[in-house]
Image: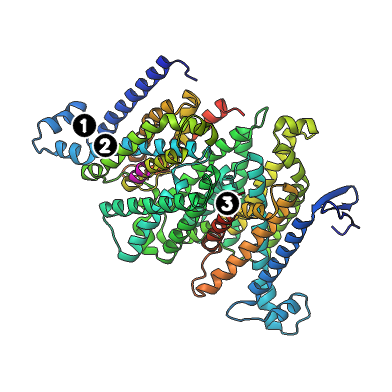
């Protein structure tokens, strides 16, 4: 970031080329516009999310306080300490899940693929749910590292068991399903035999919620996001090549195995860390890439960034709605994502049925 | 992979024999040991002794139920994977498990229902309604229903329904406590009356599936090819979906949502018999029965006197084997 950038645009093709040092990025004009609009939506979502609550703050005051220009200490505490990190966690988690899903769908050429399908989420869930159920007094601070550990154990097993000479995505998905089934069975076991109060807490975690997430959670999540989001963006073009088939990709000059390994690692790391931070917020990883595809088409160069902001918008909005509808209970964001997102998604699917 | 017709027939016979052995073992194991002769006597010459009662009311229904549910799930899964041309599809894709769970949890949440036979009825209705909804949304409008569309609509509706389910479970701890064992899938306490109730649906579903097997093989090659071969693809798809609803709906009505079998058994079968649905479906039925029967035995024996939900065991027993198969056989 921060580097001098130049934008070369070609009016005739509707594309622009963005150059930053040795790296160049070709941008589709329409996709760029949609991306910017969605960024504004996310920004508005964050401001509304931060402003809403038992101690409401009007949007202009929110922006002032976040920029450090406010003069009300109470307001500053509520916003900067309690609400802002939570909203930012929602943004980061939504983006990470969506990108993870987009990569996996591209990699396996299967629209049903999502990080849940390769078992990474199940590993994270098993670790967190076991901790919640088996150690009732556990502090929430241990959940994130535990879930991360679970995700990476599954990822390591996936690597050991599924990686052979040809790194076939089919085998990978099948082994992932097997591992996910084992971890899922462990989670069901915990849910069936645990103390019912503990199980109820575990269910909330399983559903996915950004409740009570603060700066600590955000700071331990952000490095992963910053580490793995850029490779996702830069590998997008190679993902397009891979979608033409391994042979074609090879001829074009894409190192098939290495690219696939990198993409998979990226997807797993993004999903695993997101789940460790906010639980398994369902729907986002599966649907955000589809929604993005409806808007900008299938080229991954535009698809991945647009999916990222779509995912962010979904989770921020869902958190806001969940808090607004039943303020005493706080419906977990993971429930709202499905209740609001699924019908909208089906509507999109219905509208575009002749494509 | 088995290639010749005789090898395939022989394999099927071997699997059926294994299933029969599984049934006997399942009836035999438990707090009191019961042999084959005792079973025959319990039905031929019923004298009301304790062993007779155990055989007639507990062991036999349970063993039959496990074999039946396993067969239903595996066949339904194989059909869904063929219908949507998607290896990740399972009976859950039509929203069947999510619909059944939603209906049962709603019944518990609103009316406080606790009887297994009511659960079965409610679950079947919920499954059928959800599947109709998914199929309806997937096929409205003009043009042929793309396979991907059905799969994705199904996933979206399932996500929606299970969110409602989870919301109810989070709001009411009592509902959660009542229903969590059912939700994990189990064959505990299922009796012959329940099996009799659903057996017509199961038979209809299985016969329909077998009758369609040749058409599904053609459909796997694409709608155009199937049409070219003289098929009415829309009719085939609707009938196939109907058989999935009958089979998976019955399965979830009897045992609750049991995952894994519908997704994985067809893959395991395909590694052995190839892509012809005339063989995939019967093999799936028998192998599915074996897997669930085996898992049910393990569930009862492993942590006695506690019983593990069979949905947990299917995954723990079947998944390592499945991973082994995928590692050794799956190719590009």
- In the image, B205 versus A71, the foreground residue is B205
Circle 2 residues within 10 Å: few <14, some 14–19, many ≥20: some
Q: CA distance from mark 3 to mark 2?
A: 55 Å
Can I make out residue A281 in this image?
A: no
Label the magenta part by its dominant secondary structure.
helix
Q: Which residue is mark 3?
A: A353
Q: Is residue B70 magenta?
A: no
Subunit ID for the residue under disc 3 = A
Contact between marks 3 and 2 (CB within 8 A): the answer is: no
- Alpha carbons under labels 2 and 1: distance apart: 8 Å
Residue B330, x across and y down, in percent: 57, 28
**Comparing labels 1 and 3, the label whose residue is closer to the camera:** 3
Q: Is residue A223 left or right of residue B1?
A: right
Residue to which mark 1 is pinned = B34
- Vertical placement of residue A101 versus A219, above or below: above
Residue A143 appears at what percent x and percent y? 58, 57
Q: Magenta segment, which residues?
A: B246-250
Is mark 2 in CB contact (under 8 Å) with mark 1? yes
Query: For mark 3, does the 10 Å Cα neighbourhood hold few (<14), some (14 to 19), or many (20 or more) residues?
Result: some
Please report the residue visible at 54 percent of the width from the left and 56 percent of the height from the top: A346
Q: How crowded is the residue under tag 1: few (<14 C-alpha within 10 Å), some, or many (20+)?
A: many
Residue in the picture at 40% in, 65% down: B172
Q: Which residue is mark 2?
A: B30
* Camera-nearest residue between B260 and A308: A308
Chain of the residue under label 1:
B
Q: Can marks 1 and 3 be said to lie on one chain?
A: no
Residue at 46% x, 45% y is A185
């Amino acid at each position: 970031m921060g580097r001098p950038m130049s934008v070369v645009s070609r009016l005739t093709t509707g594309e622009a080329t963005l150059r930053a040092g040795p790296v160049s990025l070709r941008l589709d004009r329409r996709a760029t516009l949609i991306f910017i609009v969605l960024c504004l939506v996310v920004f508005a979502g964050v401001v509304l999310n931060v402003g809403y609550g038992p101690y409401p703050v009007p949007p202009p005051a929110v922006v002032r306080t976040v920029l450090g220009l406010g003069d009300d200490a109470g307001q500053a505490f509520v916003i900067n300490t309690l609400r802002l990190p939570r909203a930012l966690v929602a943004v980061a988690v939504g983006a990470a899940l969506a990108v993870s899903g987009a990569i996996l769908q591209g990699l396996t050429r299967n629209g049903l693929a999502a990080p849940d399908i390769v078992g990474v989420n199940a590993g994270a869930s098993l670790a967190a749910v076991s901790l919640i159920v088996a150690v009732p007094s556990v502090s929430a601070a241990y959940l994130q590292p535990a879930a991360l550990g679970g995700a990476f154990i599954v990822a390591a097993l996936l690597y050991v068991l599924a990686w052979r000479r040809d790194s076939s995505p089919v085998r990978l998905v099948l082994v992932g399903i097997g591992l996910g089934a084992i971890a899922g069975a462990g989670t069901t076991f915990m849910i069936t035999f645990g103390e019912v109060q503990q199980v109820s807490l575990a269910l909330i975690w399983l559903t996915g919620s950004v409740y009570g997430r603060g700066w600590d959670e955000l700071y331990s999540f952000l490095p992963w996001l910053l580490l793995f989001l850029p490779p996702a963006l830069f590998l997008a073009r190679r993902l397009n090549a891979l979608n033409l088939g391994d042979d074609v990709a090879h001829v074009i000059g894409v190192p098939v195995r290495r690219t696939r390994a990198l993409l998979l690692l990226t997807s797993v790391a993004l999903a695993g860390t997101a789940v460790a931070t906010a639980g398994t917020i369902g729907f986002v990883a599966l649907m955000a890439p589809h929604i993005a595809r409806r808007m900008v088409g299938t080229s991954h160069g535009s698809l991945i960034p647009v999916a990222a902001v779509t995912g962010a918008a979904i989770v921020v909005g869902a958190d806001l709605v969940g808090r607004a509808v039943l303020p005493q209970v706080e419906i977990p964001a993971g429930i709202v994502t499905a209740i609001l997102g699924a019908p909208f998604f089906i509507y999109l699917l219905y509208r575009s049925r002749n494509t | 992979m088995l290639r010749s017709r005789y090898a395939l027939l022989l394999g099927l016979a071997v699997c059926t024999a294994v299933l029969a052995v599984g049934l006997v073992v399942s009836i035999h194991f438990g707090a009191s040991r019961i042999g084959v002769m005792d079973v025959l006597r319990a039905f031929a010459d019923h004298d009301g002794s304790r062993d007779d009662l155990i055989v007639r009311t507990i062991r036999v229904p349970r063993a039959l139920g496990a074999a039946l549910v396993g067969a239903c799930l595996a066949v339904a899964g194989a059909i869904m994977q063929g219908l949507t041309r998607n290896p990740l599809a399972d009976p859950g894709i039509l929203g069947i498990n999510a619909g059944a769970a939603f209906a049962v949890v709603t019944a518990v949440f609103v009316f406080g229902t606790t009887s297994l036979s009511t659960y079965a009825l409610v679950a079947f209705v919920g499954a059928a309604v959800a599947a109709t909804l998914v199929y309806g949304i997937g096929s409205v409008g003009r043009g042929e229903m793309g396979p991907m569309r059905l799969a994705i609509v199904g996933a979206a509706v399932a996500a929606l329904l299970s969110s409602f389910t989870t919301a109810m479970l989070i709001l009411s701890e009592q509902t959660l406590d009542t229903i969590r064992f059912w939700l994990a899938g189990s064959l505990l306490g299922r009796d012959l009356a329940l099996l009799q109730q659903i057996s017509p649906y199961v038979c209809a579903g299985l016969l329909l599936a077998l009758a369609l097997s040749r058409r599904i093989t053609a459909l796997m090659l694409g709608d155009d090819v199937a049409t070219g071969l003289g098929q009415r693809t829309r009719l085939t798809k609707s009938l196939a979906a109907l058989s999935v609803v009958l089979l998976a709906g019955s399965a979830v009505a009897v045992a609750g949502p049991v995952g894994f079998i519908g997704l994985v058994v067809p893959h395991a079968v395909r590694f052995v018999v190839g892509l012809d649905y005339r063989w995939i479906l019967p093999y799936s039925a028998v192998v599915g029965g074996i897997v669930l029967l085996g898992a049910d035995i393990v569930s009862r024996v492993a942590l006695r006197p506690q019983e593990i939900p069979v949905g947990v065991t299917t995954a723990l027993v079947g998944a390592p084997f499945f991973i082994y198969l995928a590692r050794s056989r799956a190719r590009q």
